[in-house]
Image (tube, rainbow, N blue to C red):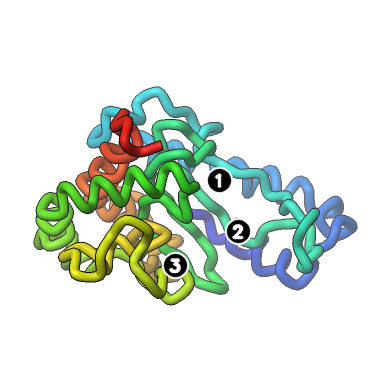
Amino acid sequence: MLQKDTLSFFDELRLNNHKEWFDKNRSRYEKVKKDYHRLVDEILTGMQKHVPGISHLKVKDCTFRINRDIRFSRDKTPYKTHLGIIISPLGKRMQNAGYYVHLDPEKGSFAGGGIYMPQGNVIKKIRKEIDVFYDDLLEIIHHENFKNTYGDIDRSDEITLVRPPKGYDKSNPAIEFLKLKSFTSSVPISKSLLTDKNGTRKVVEKLVILKPFIDFLNRGVISEDPSVI
């Protein structure tokens, strides 16, 4: 997966997250960036063998700048101390479901996918898809590969409505899914896997298992149903 020097760079950046240190270590960062892009290329190449809808994506469509957007944040540290990889048909616009890899040896890494906190018109489409095709969703998340790898869809109080969303009754068999405000599933990546020579292949294998779930969500997102505005 990643070079040990890349992880060491981020270990030091956490302790020296300011422009002066970064400028002095810019040459190191260029090597980190090269390592990052190499990994993205390997993951993207592996995924494109299984997910035809992403065959047009390039490395630049899947990577993020190291600079943080601090305009509306209390945390004014200027640089990210993790690496993110987004693989979505629309690239980083993230207007539909996609695959995501988060690499952070300090706070934890994970692989997963879905659509995080979609906007109102999109969430309405997804809820309609769940309501009408609930059996399809159950078949996907109860599949042995999905259960053994991801367990279930991600859930927490922060992404779950207290009451049923407008238009749905609490007796709806899919109500616990309909109450979700975010539709993702993820699995931790161990710290040892970050430098494992087989790590990239193992991450790709985990991501590919999510394809039916991602396809289900995007089927709803691209719906042209006039009843969903």
Tags 2 and 1 touching, CB below 8 Å: yes
Q: Residue at x 76, y 46 (%)?
A: 27
Q: Give the residue number, with chain letter if any, for mark 2.
A: 5
The residue under label 2 is which amino acid type?
Asp
Q: Residue at x 65, y 45 (%)?
A: 31
In the picture, measured across the screen, residue 167 lies left or right of residue 141, that is right
Q: Give the residue number, with chain letter if any, for mark 1.
A: 35
The residue under label 3 is which amino acid type?
Ile
Closer mark to the observer between disc 2 and disc 1? 1
Tags 3 and 1 touching, CB below 8 Å: no
Badge 1, how many Cα within 10 Å: few under 14, some, many 20+? some
Q: Residue at x 52, y 33 (%)?
A: 61
In the picture, measured across the screen, residue 102 lies left or right of residue 48, that is right
Picture layout, residue 87 above or below residue 14: above
On-image quarter of the C terminus: top left
Real-space Cα separation, disc 2 to disc 1, in angstroms: 10 Å
Give the SS element for disc 3.
Answer: helix
* Disc marking residue 57: none
Q: Give the residue number, with chain letter if any, for mark 3.
A: 159
Give the SS element for disc 1.
Answer: helix
In the picture, measured across the screen, residue 154 lies left or right of residue 213, that is right
